[in-house]
Image (tube, helix red, strand yellow):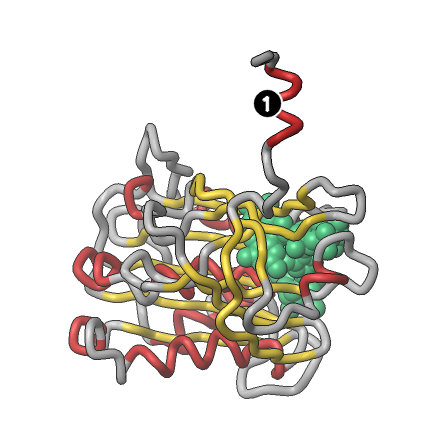
Amino acid sequence: DQSPVKDKAATPVTLPDAQTVTSVKHYTDRLFAFRVTRPRSLRFRSGEFVMIGLMGDNGKPLLRAYSIASPSWDEELEFYSIKVPDGPLTSKLQHIQPGDEIILRPKPVGTLVHDALLPGKRLWMFATGTGFAPFASLLRDPDTWEKYDEVIMTHTCREVAELAYGREVVESLKDDELIGELVGDKLRYYPTTTREESAKMGRITTLIESGEVFRDLDIAPLDPTVDRAMVCGSLAFNLDIKALLEKAGLREGANSDPAEFVVEKAFVGDGV
Ligand code: FAD
Ligand code: A2P
């Protein structure tokens, strides 16, 4: 008897799309980063996201969207994660250890990719919170440095400790064998905090509106013939930056219709 029902029942139960955790680093009580093995067949464009997760208590995979934080040439995959105390996934994910398995669906997608932007001279990367993750990938991608004369990475967080992961990625670039030379002096890093004293305070949106960021960096204001932008943060942040970019004459692009800026949500939340 070859009935399909019986065949299905005979299939051994294994974790689907399992990958093994290779390292974990905690930054604050709300933030951590981890690395996992990479499926051999997985190809992705820096800036894209995948679905990852753990097996739920009901025996079904509990998956969430995560930006890949490592560059496309890396042997492993890196992720940068929030810890939501009662979040279905991250209340458990925050406890993973090297050797543990996670589920990773190898179908990368997303709009925060070079293909969705027309050629330009200067690339702005605007991030808040864990919205830094896709830029951790893009900053380590040689394409970024080959395509632009200048890259400005802004990262706004509530507190200084929340900037640490991003700062580490930025500082690692100059020592990177592969892209250290390509980066040269093209990168301007502009971290700001809003609720704890630091060298630069304020929302990046406020600093753009007042012109302070342009004065600080000694550069001309946003110009659609020169500037390209990639945005990743909360819905409220994305909407506010989008309005500022559009006011400056930049248009939103997509994979199928490249233009001057692209936007990705860092999470789905209460938003505005
Ligand atoms: P959920 O039920 O998913 O979320 C509970 C609440 O927590 C949300 O309503 C929201 O208010 C808040 N929240 C969720 N994620 C975040 C966050 N990242 N920062 C601040 N508040 C948050 N999360 C990451 O940590 N790293 C990533 O690289 C990442 N990439 C994403 C890419 C896309 C395209 C999208 C749509 C989301 C991404 N997220 C990322 C969010 C992620 O999918 C989950 O929401 C998050 O892991 C929390 O899962 P959860 O099940 O614990 O709680
Ligand atoms: P603020 O402290 O003034 O709200 P969150 O943790 O809420 O996602 O915020 C992360 C960082 O992004 C915080 O520094 C926050 O500033 C900033 N932020 C939140 N919403 C916006 C917005 N609409 N425009 C600019 N910055 C924002």
Quick check: 201 above or below 43? below
Quick check: 224 above or below 205? above
Q: Quick check: 257 left or right of 63?
A: left
Instruction: List the residue tagged with mark 1.
Output: 7
Q: Quick check: 206 left or right of 173?
A: right
10 Å neighbourhood of mark 1: few (<14), some, or many (≥20)? few
Picture coordinates of residue 267, whole percent (x, y): 63, 50
**Residue sticking out furthest to the right:** 86
Q: Residue at horizontal 63%, vertical 47%?
A: 64
Quick check: 86 above or below 104? below
Q: Residue at horizontal 53%, vertical 66%?
A: 21
Taking the image in four quarters, ligand 2 sits in the one at bottom right
Q: Residue at horizontal 41%, vertical 52%?
A: 230
Q: Quick check: 272 left or right of 248?
A: right
Quick check: 258 above or below 52? above
Which image quadrant for residue 81? Answer: bottom right
Inspect this view and state whether residue 64 appears. Answer: yes
Picture coordinates of residue 146, whole percent (x, y): 17, 60
Within 8 Å: ligand 1 and the Cβ of disc 1? no
Q: Out of 245 and 143, give the one closest to the viewer.
A: 143
Q: Out of 185 and 113, give the one closest to the viewer.
A: 113
**Residue sticking out furthest to the front:** 1
Inspect this view and state whether residue 229 appears. Answer: no
- Kindly identify the amino acid type of the residue bearing the numbered disc 1: Asp
Q: Quadrant of the N terminus?
A: top right
Picture coordinates of residue 272, whole percent (x, y): 73, 46
Q: Residue at horizontal 48%, vertical 74%?
A: 166
Q: Out of 238 and 223, give the one closest to the viewer.
A: 238
Q: Quick check: 189 left or right of 10?
A: left
Picture coordinates of residue 258, whole percent (x, y): 31, 35
Q: Secondary structure at mark 1?
A: helix
